[in-house]
């Protein structure tokens, strides 16, 4: 018997790509990382590194993927998990249809396809229920995300109705959707999830509850953490005294505290960190004499507990998206300790910066680079909004120029240069022409450094102009 003919691919109602943009996409997808034994890349742009930016711009403009590009698009997403959300959103409903015919693309059926075009209208109660009960995992995740962003209570009720019958890994993914629009009405459901049979689900429920400052769990954690930290007034200057927990009781475990410490960590410091991380940051001012976050962070900490305490406050500020505490923990970018090691690591500073708005983040990172240079700035640059705001762009280019003129070892800046290619505002290309010539090399410069710097700046300028052309091609008026 002949195999049954597959149903046709679903329609994609989004407008087609302008022809120039479609040609550009084909070029980006055709580029593959070369197998090179050398450290020099020449002046040619790295096209695969521009694909994420191209996809983001195409999705922002609401274009549909050309059908002929779907196989290469799925292949690219298969090889790079970081591309998958944007690639599947751009590919649209035809990607799910196509993935059923190729085992290499099955990942698309277990991924989140953005906001999808197959999601029923959210007021269509029967359609929503049917898709939730019968849809593919990716379709159900997309439905829950869309419903949560518009009707949070309806999404929670849908989730609660069949909660006990879902697989543990699916419950974890679905529970994560509650981060959108998280509010006090979610507390009863999350309190029930604290008793879930999956440890990961319990931990996620506890994390979400601790991000609700008014929740009962947050208050329980505030009491526990507050009992561990106090101001000692018997010293010459007020000092924070820390008495870490001596045990992890059943109540702490139910509220998400992991009892067993990782290898190399002391149990008591492990428990303390979890309690402080989960306590509402707003509770510390009233527990520590009405001090502001900046005043609290400035207090000395007795007996070597400063690193543990400040690291936990950093995690709390990130979890609770508390910009006031983030500023206090970050301090001034020009401060000597900002360059490390200090009480707060660069990785923690990068996370704290993520709680600030884009303009404030840019100003802080620019100040850091001007004081401490580029060698420690890579992680911080990674959290700046793209394209980089003018202060960050100027600081990076100035620092690279200083390094070049000093004859610094050029390959140590290749990571920052690669970031600049992807993140510097394309309009900066015209300001870089003066850096394209091979500079005179100081006597103590690395051999060949001048040629490398010239090559790298030429590649930077070429890439910026290519990015500008990409955006022009994606404007609806382009043909």
Image (cartoon, rainbow, N blue to C red):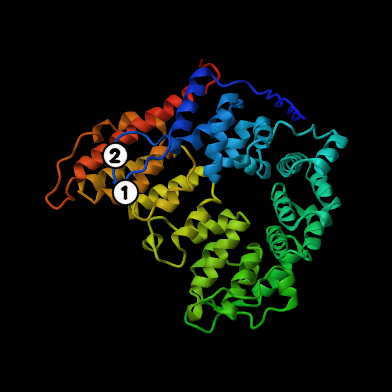
Q: How would you rate the neighbour count of disc 2 (Cα within 10 Å): few for under 14, some for 14-19, many for 20 or more?
A: many
Quarter of the image containing the N terminus? top right
Check residue 456 in the rendering and tell me which mark sits there, or answer none.
Answer: 2
The answer to whether residue 96 is above or below residue 383 is: above
Q: Position of residue 359 (x, y in %)?
A: 49, 43
Corner quadrant of residue 462: top left
Q: Are marks 2 and 1 in contact (CB under 8 Å)?
A: yes
Question: Can you identify the residue that label 1 sits on?
Answer: 413
Check residue 461 in the rendering and tell me which mark sits there, or answer none.
Answer: none
**Count of numbered circles in the view:** 2
Q: Secondary structure at mark 1?
A: helix
Q: Position of residue 347 (x, y in %)?
A: 47, 59
Q: Position of residue 217 (x, y in %)?
A: 74, 66
Residue at 39% x, 63% y is 340
Corner quadrant of residue 433: top left
Farthest residue to the front: give it.
1
Q: How would you rate the neighbour count of disc 1 (Cα within 10 Å): few for under 14, some for 14-19, many for 20 or more?
A: some
The answer to whether residue 79 is above or below residue 432 is: below
* First reached walking from the N terminus: tag 2 or tag 1: 1
Answer whether residue 326 is visible to the viewer in this image: yes
């Amino acid at each position: 018997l002949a195999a049954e003919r597959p149903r046709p691919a679903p329609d994609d109602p989004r407008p087609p790509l302008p022809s120039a943009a479609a040609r550009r996409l084909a070029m980006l997808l055709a580029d593959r990382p070369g197998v090179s034994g050398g450290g020099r890349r020449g002046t040619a742009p790295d096209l695969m590194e521009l694909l994420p930016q191209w996809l983001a711009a195409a999705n922002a403009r609401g274009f549909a993927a050309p059908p002929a590009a779907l196989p290469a698009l799925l292949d690219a997403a298969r090889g790079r998990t970081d591309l998958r959300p944007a690639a599947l959103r751009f590919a649209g409903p035809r990607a799910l249809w196509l993935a059923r015919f190729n085992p290499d693309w099955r990942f698309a059926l277990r991924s989140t396809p953005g906001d999808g075009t197959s999601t029923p209208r959210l007021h269509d109660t029967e359609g929503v229920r049917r898709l939730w009960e019968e849809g593919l995992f990716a379709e159900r995740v997309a439905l829950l995300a869309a419903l949560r962003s518009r009707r949070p209570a309806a999404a929670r009720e849908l989730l609660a109705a069949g909660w006990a019958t879902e697989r543990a890994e699916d419950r974890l993914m679905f529970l994560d959707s509650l981060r959108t629009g998280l509010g006090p009405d979610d507390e009863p459901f999350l309190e029930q999830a604290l008793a879930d049979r999956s440890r990961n689900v319990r931990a996620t429920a506890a994390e979400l509850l601790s991000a609700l400052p008014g929740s009962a769990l947050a208050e329980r954690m505030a009491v526990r953490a507050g009992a561990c930290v106090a101001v000692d007034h018997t010293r010459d200057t007020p000092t924070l005294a820390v008495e870490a927990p001596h045990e992890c009781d059943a109540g702490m475990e139910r509220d998400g505290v992991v009892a067993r410490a990782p290898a190399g960590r002391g149990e008591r410091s492990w428990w303390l960190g979890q309690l402080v991380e989960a306590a509402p940051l707003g509770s510390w001012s009233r527990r520590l004499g009405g001090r502001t976050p900046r005043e609290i962070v400035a207090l000395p900490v007795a007996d070597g507990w400063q690193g543990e305490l400040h690291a936990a406050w950093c995690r709390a500020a990130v979890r609770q998206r508390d910009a006031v505490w983030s500023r206090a923990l970050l301090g001034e970018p020009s401060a000597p300790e900002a360059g490390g090691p200090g009480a707060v690591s660069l990785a923690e500073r990068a996370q704290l910066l993520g709680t600030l708005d884009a303009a404030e983040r840019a100003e802080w990172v620019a100040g850091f680079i001007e004081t401490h240079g580029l060698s420690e700035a890579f992680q911080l640059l990674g959290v700046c909004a793209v394209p980089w705001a003018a202060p960050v762009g100027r600081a990076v280019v100035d620092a690279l120029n200083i390094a070049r003129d000093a004859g610094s070892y050029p390959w140590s800046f290749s990571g920052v240069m690669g970031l600049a290619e992807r993140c510097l505002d394309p309009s900066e290309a015209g300001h870089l022409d003066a850096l394209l010539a091979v500079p005179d090399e100081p006597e103590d410069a690395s051999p060949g450094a001048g040629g490398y710097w010239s090559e790298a700046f030429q590649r930077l300028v070429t890439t910026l102009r290519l990015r500008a052309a990409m955006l022009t091609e994606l404007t609806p008026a382009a043909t």
